[in-house]
Amino acid sequence: MRPLLGLFLFSSLLYGEFEYKGYVGVDTQAYLTKPAGKHPGNLTLQQQLELKYIEGDFEAAMNIYAQEDSYDLSDEKNERTFIRLDELYGKYYFENDMLFCGRNIRFWGALEVNNIVDTFNTKDFRTDGLDPQKQGAWNASYTHYFENSELSVIAKFYEEKQEMAAYPYVYYFFPEKFGPLDVSYNPNRKSSESLYRPTLYLSYSGSTESDYPIDYAVIVQHGFDSQRAFDSVVDLASLSTEFVEEVYLVNKLMTYNTMVVGSTLLKVEALATDVIDDNVSSSGKTVADYYQFGLGIEHTLTSLVGDSDLGLLSEYYYYNTFDQSNKIATDLNLFQVFQNDLFVGFRYTFNDASDSSIIAGAIIDMDYQEQSYSFKYETRLFDVLSVKADYAYINPSKDTLTAYHLMGLNPSDGTVSAHQRVGLNLSYYF
Amino acid sequence: MKRLLLSMAMVANVWAISNYDLAKKSDAVMSGYGDAKAEMVMTLINANGQERQRTMKSMVLEKKGGDKSLMEFLTPADVKGTKFLSYEHADKDDDQWLYLPALKRVKRIASKNKSGSFMGSEFSYEDLSAFNIEKYNYSGDAQEVTVNGKKYYKSERIPNSKNSGYTKQVAWTTTDTFLTMKVDYYDRKKELLKTSTLSDYKKISGVWRIGKIEMLNHQNDKKTILVWKNETIKNGLSDKDFNKRVLKR
């Protein structure tokens, strides 16, 4: 019976179509300005492999990412070496419906730099700290398609860790010491509920057919929040403090929309969160209800020089809490980096055979006098080798404990270093 | 003698065809395919003769108000799986979306730019959109010309859209089959910018389909050759096959 079953499975696979793609790359950064004690650079080998099997209306896929940091081969380990399963799923398309089950990555959002509503997957801070990757989430969904819209019910089955590299990686957001205390980060989540409690989403999205067409989406969520509260537990016996993530339950309403007006895209992302968990912190405080929004504009000037295009971008992000009494209410405790920030930048597309482009911009934090500037050039060599070069400069807040302030803190003298880096990524795609 | 000249002129006038009627006839012989599926190979050749190849899968749905099309990029490998969905409109800007597989993102794009280069090639987005009579202004009659012993109609059309990259297009169309064999494109400065040479026409299920276009840019000496392979028409595709949902499939 077993050989027959095997033969059946093998022969059914032959009817379908296999696809594969991926890359092998080297990612390197040199940190020109950094806090004392942190690594002066990183050299990381990266690999990604995606396999897809399609037979009629059935599709299955697997996506694996792995990286190896050179420091993890030495005594100065920074915990940036891992293999991660991002996708492993099956989905089946009916006439007007689709069933999905497995692990995957979803994208929600309209903005370019920071997607407020892109909350489905947790981030992996073992990857590049200035552009962390998302990691897959186990879930099942049912989608019904209408003529110009779709309705999805999604159940996420497990609340993932927010993985973090270790000190002395430059983007490890905690200092080695805080005063006399050794500082450590524990990625295991604290919660009053089982982490296997499903988080439910109801999503409705579509497009209008008008002179100024709009792509819209509304999502209602009940379950664990993507925002984490960081609780610190001090152990005076060992003179250490450990940061632990609090995971709590919420009801959330989210929306993201894009409107086309000629050569201009107008974008809005917004959410309102009702925290329904009690007593999540060791301090006895509850995370405050909060709201966030982002507004964006993208205008493209075409055929500027030859075939090149220039996209002018500006985005504004705002975060605030509702009731603040007896609440963990500050954006600093909650690591909300974009709480009153303005981004201005541009994307210059050469429209050449190598798809070369330059993306540059500045993010100004208007509350904490923090600025970050970035410049990235991308091109392709010999059709298979992707080349990305970048430069970034971050001037952290001098007197407020923001993430960048903590990242740049020199434990010996309490000064805060600016951050400056150059990076190069070479990836062979197949 | 005067009478003879007058009658000759009358005969010539009877046989003359207006630029508009010629465009209608030319459109008619290429219409009626319902929908089409094909593999496309695009060869980019720079001024030094170096070649780069791009491959795509394409699907088109013929619609009265404007075609719907879906293109999936297969190579270069770093853009494999990127999809481009477009709903053309004769009377307003097209609706366009791009699917970026690395981000799992469907991104709305502004389509006002019709003259931008498609994938770094010498084709612009408007060159690749389906020919639609209503997108142009016509006046006067087509000229009958002989090139290498073959007769063609030479006709002019002016793009209606102020966002077009062209001020004029001059087309050479066969007098028997009404198939376009060559088009000269004049830029916004009214100078000759590009010439496309169309060939390898095939009749599939009674409808003429183009097999190859060579686009030569006279101003930078670059050339792009676009070849359609394994094309099938009347596959029974419908609007559902061009819904936004197909981008994530």
Image (cartoon, coloured by chain):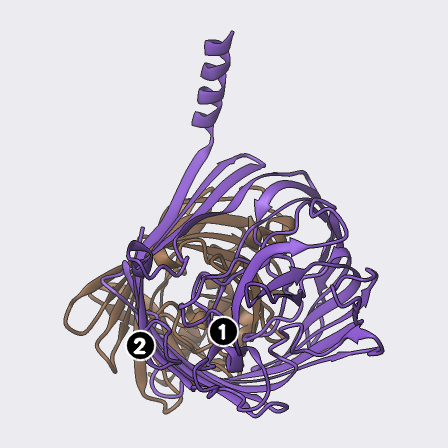
Chain colours: A purple, B brown
Q: Which residue lies furthest to the top in this view?
A: A1
Answer whether residue B123 is visible to the viewer in this image: yes
Figure quadrant of residue B187: bottom left
> Label 2 is found on which chain of the structure?
B
Figure quadrant of residue A352: bottom left
Answer whether residue A301 is visible to the viewer in this image: no
Q: In which quarter of the image is the N terminus of chain B?
A: bottom left
For label 2, the SS is strand
Query: Is residue A214 rendered to the left or right of residue A273?
Result: left
Q: In the picture shown, does residue A162 fall above or below A6?
A: below
The foreground one among A188 and B91 is A188
Let me know if marks 2 and 1 both belong to one chain: no
Query: Is residue A148 rendered to the left or right of residue A385?
Result: right
* Residue B194: assigned label: 2
* Residue occupying the point 67% across, 79% down: A294
* Residue A334: assigned label: none
Please name the residue that numbered disc 1 is placed on. Answer: A177
Gap between marks 2 and 1, in whole Å? 66 Å
The foreground one among A229 and A293 is A229
Q: In the picture shown, does residue B229 fall above or below A228?
A: above
Q: How crowded is mark 1: few (under 14 residues within 10 Å), some or many (20 or more)?
A: some
The foreground one among A35 and A42 is A35
Q: Where is residue A28 in the image (x, y as percent from the top left)?
A: 30, 68
Looking at the rendered structure, the kind of residue marked 1 is Lys
Q: Which residue lies furthest to the front in this view?
A: A237
